[in-house]
Image (spheres, grey):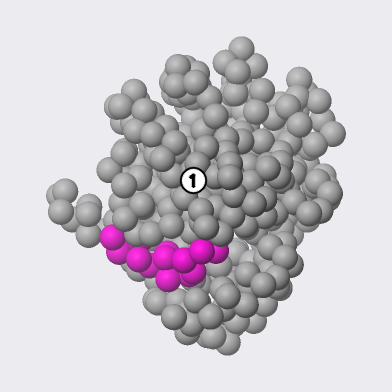
Amino acid sequence: MLYKLIRSLLFKLDPETAHALIMGNIDWAAATDLIRLVCPRPVRAPVEVMGLKFPNAVGLAAGMDKTGEHVAALGDLGFGHIEAGTFTPYPQSGNPKPRLWRLIPAEGVINHMGFNNCGADKAIENLDRSARSYRSMGGILGVNIGKQNSTPVENALPDYQKCMQKLYGSADYLAIDISCPNTPGLTRLQEVDALEPLVRGIAEERERLAGEYERRVPITIKIGPDLQDETILAMSDLFVKYGIDAVTATNTTVSRKGVADLEKSSNPGGLSGKPLFERSTEVVRLLADHLQGAMPIIAVGGIIRADDAVAKMQAGASLVQLYTGFIYTGPELIAQCARAIDDWQRQQA
Ligand SMILES: Cc1cc2nc3c(=O)[nH]c(=O)nc-3n(C[C@H](O)[C@H](O)[C@H](O)COP(=O)(O)O)c2cc1C
């Protein structure tokens, strides 16, 4: 109820201004317990995935905390894991504004952000400060990494390796983003010929770092929905071959199916939210049928209500993440999803 009121005020603002307003105030709101007014207590329903113990199956998708400064406050909302980033080796400002649009009748968002972030060095500092209490209470911190916009796609591997070297010690797991449609050429990394050397290089770097840190940090690779089914399956075979620990499906879509007649739908960028649900869930099902448990799937895309989260689990996911649903439904969605998944899992047992 209260969130509906807050949302109606936020939706009067330009979307990026509203985002900045929320992120600029979330830390003190959490510190003063004001957050409890819009958010039920976190749900404890532990699950083990990638060798990590998650307090519940619901996480925050990458892109909301792009500086890693707000992990503790976002954790207070009840997320079992938080994926901070995407971080690139050096700071960058992303694409020119405006670069974020709401498609309100469709419960969708188009973003053309372009990996605006503080860079890996600053991220280490921010995460060290903001994630310590969250992790000490059992919350899981994912660190999502990408390539610099100015790096040609053929040279992407050294960018990922640089981010791994800098951020390995800060992460419970690493997420490799090769599917953001807003970074020039990035989605070409998903072509199988380009992908094999990249995945091999990432796997080798992880082995080296695991030795150095005496800790093996799990890796998930985040893929997009705009690929042929055969390509998705071939990619997942490569991930298994090189010992990648999970696949995250999916990033945003460049498709405008079902929303083409809406105002603002012709803006450039990736579409998220409800219009993405069907295809991203189909990708999860496709992967699950093919992988037969060889690797867990982290499902993200279009979770707006608790039923959507359960549908992702029924399709074969081990964890879910949300972003756009958080904007439309509000923070109570986190506990609703965690409880619905827990109930569903108990029925299966
Ligand atoms: C404003 C915005 C920024 C995003 N930034 C990133 C990002 O930096 N890295 C990334 O891997 N995904 C990013 N995403 C994609 C989300 O993590 C998620 O995969 C996608 O939005 C689908 O989930 P949803 O329908 O629950 O929003 C972003 C999404 C939005 C809406």
First to last magenta residue range: 327-340
Q: Which residue is mark 1?
A: 275
Q: Is residue 339 magenta?
A: yes
Query: Which residue is farthest front?
Result: 261
Q: Nearer the viewer, residue 17 or 32?
A: 17
Q: Is residue 198 magenta?
A: no
Task: Identify the amino acid type marked 1.
Answer: Pro
State whether residue 346 is above or below residue 161.
below
- Residue at 44% x, 80% y: name it: 1
**Residue 164 location, x and y as percent?**
67, 39
The residue closer to the viewer here, 195 or 259, is 259
Residue 310 picture location, percent across and down = 30, 51
What's the magenta bit mostly, secondary-structure-wise? helix
Q: Quadrant of residue 183?
A: top right
In this orientation, does residue 110 appear? no
| Above or below, 319 relative to 13 | above
For the residue labelled by badge 1, is the local secondary structure a helix, a strand or a loop? helix
Q: Is residue 335 left or right of residue 37?
A: left
Residue lying at 27% horizontally and 43% vertically, measured from the top left: 314
Q: Is residue 33 above or below residue 182?
A: below
Horizontal placement of 107 versus 333: left or right?
A: right
Residues 59 and 285: in front is: 285
Q: Where is 102 relative to 315, above or below?
A: below
Q: Residue 19, percent across and down?
A: 67, 65
Count numbered badges in the picture: 1
